[in-house]
């Protein structure tokens, strides 16, 4: 079978393309700039999800699509799905456990295509910790609000492992998989684990939500996105995020811990010391 992987230069899609290589499936990666994937040893085809006409060539001969939707709204998705449905028979969509307005719309649009579908609904990515890397390298500390916000970050490797099962195996059509890592950790604990793995203490410095808000706005985040992030973090203080066993159920292997994720990315927190 042949699988088209979108978002193949990104956190999850890159892993999906790599994992598929070991299954015997033919892998084709979609990229706006194919040079970004030159070193991967996989077929790469130029295409842009913002321009559905560019997707016919990448989709020729494809059976299944791993779909990352990189936009903040579902606008334009119906047209993209029409093109996918002309060529492929299955789509695995990287949704979100938050199932915000645009993800809900996206899921409804996919359900109507007639394609076989699987929705992956991950909670917080462990990879979000990379946003702390600059501060950790510079001062061995992370400044932020809601240090007690507690969640079970998921390794991108495990999201990809589930995606590959759904893309290439039977029994996943019509399933919505809520995915998390194996253990709940407060943000303060995540920062401590990073310090333990890199062999250098890392402190959490609590800042007020108002300070965090101002900083995000200064960095150009839209108002609504800032409010959404801060509200979600506040909610995780009083009600920690869930821990699901879906990764293990689908793949047969235990989900990777946050500590393992830090091991796999420790250079990001160490370079330039
Ligand atoms: N972070 C979290 O905690 C979290 C939790 C749940 C769900 N999610 C969901 O995960 C998704 C993001 O996945 P990710 O982190 O793996 O992605 P990512 O690392 O942010 O990368 C985005 C990918 O989309 C591609 N892309 C951007 N614009 C494109 C376009 N016009 N046409 C084709 N490709 C385009 C990028 O390719 P280029 O190289 O061309 O830029 C890149 O490969 C989002 O939908 C988000 O809602 C995230």
Image (cartoon, rainbow, N blue to C red):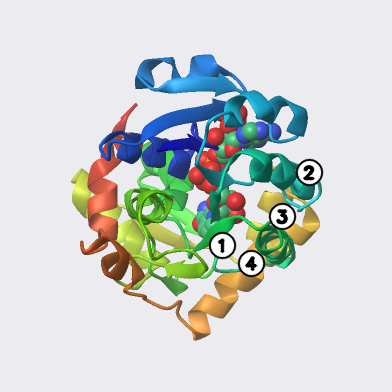
Image coords of residue 202 (percent x, y): 31, 52
Residue at which label 4 appears: 230
Q: Is residue 65 left or right of residue 12?
A: right
Q: For disc 2, does the CB lie below 8 Å from ligand 1?
A: no
| Spatial CA span between label 1 and label 3 | 26 Å
How far apart marks 3 and 4 lie (CA) works out to: 12 Å
Q: Residue at x 32, y 29 (%)?
A: 271
Q: Position of residue 123 (x, y in %)?
A: 48, 65
Earlier-in-chain disc, 1 versus 4: 1
- Asked which secondary structure carries label 4, the reply is helix
Determine if the C-beta at disc 1 is less than 8 A from ligand 1. Answer: yes
Tell me, yes or no, if residue 39 can be seen here.
yes
**Residue 214: assigned label:** 3
In the rendering, which numbered label is found on residue 79?
Answer: 2
In contact (CB < 8 Å): disc 1 and disc 3: no
Is residue 24 or residue 186 the one in the foreground?
24
Q: Secondary structure at mark 1?
A: loop
Cα separation between marks 1 and 4:
17 Å
Report helix, strand or loop for mark 3.
helix
Q: Which residue was labeled with disc 1? A: 96
Q: Secondary structure at mark 2?
A: helix
- Mark 1 or mark 3, which has the lower sequence index? 1
The answer to which of 63 and 101 lies nearer the viewer is 63
**Callout in the foreground (1, 4):** 1
Disc 3 beta carbon < 8 A from ligand 1? no
Mark 4 surroundings within 10 Å by alpha-carbon count, few (fewer than 14), some (14 through 19), many (20 or more) = some
Q: Is residue 60 above or below residue 211?
A: above
């Amino acid at each position: 079978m042949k699988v088209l992987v979108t978002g193949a230069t990104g956190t999850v899609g890159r892993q999906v393309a790599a994992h598929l290589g070991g299954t015997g499936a033919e892998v084709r990666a979609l990229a706006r700039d194919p040079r970004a994937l030159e070193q991967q040893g996989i077929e790469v085809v130029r295409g842009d999800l913002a321009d559905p006409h560019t997707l016919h060539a990448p989709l020729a001969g494809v059976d299944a699509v791993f779909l990352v939707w990189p936009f903040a709204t579902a606008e334009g998705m119906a047209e993209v799905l029409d093109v996918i449905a002309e060529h492929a028979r299955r789509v695995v969509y990287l949704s979100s456990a938050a199932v915000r307005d645009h993800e809900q719309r996206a899921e409804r649009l996919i359900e109507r295509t007639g394609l076989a579908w699987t929705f992956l609904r991950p909670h917080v990515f462990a990879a979000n910790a990379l946003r702390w890397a600059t501060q950790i390298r510079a001062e061995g500390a992370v400044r932020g609000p809601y240090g007690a916000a507690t969640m079970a970050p998921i390794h991108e490797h495990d999201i990809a492992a589930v995606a590959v099962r759904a893309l290439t195996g039977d029994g996943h059509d019509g399933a919505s998989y809520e995915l998390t890592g194996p253990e709940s950790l407060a943000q303060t604990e995540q920062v401590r684990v990073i310090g333990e793995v890199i062999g250098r203490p890392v402190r959490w410095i609590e800042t007020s939500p108002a300070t965090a808000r101002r900083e995000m706005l200064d960095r150009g985040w839209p108002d609504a996105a800032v409010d959404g992030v801060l509200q979600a973090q506040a909610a995780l203080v009083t009600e920690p995020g869930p821990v699901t066993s879906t990764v293990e159920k689908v793949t047969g292997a235990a989900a990777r811990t946050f500590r393992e994720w830090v091991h796999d990315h420790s250079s990001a927190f160490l370079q330039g010391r």
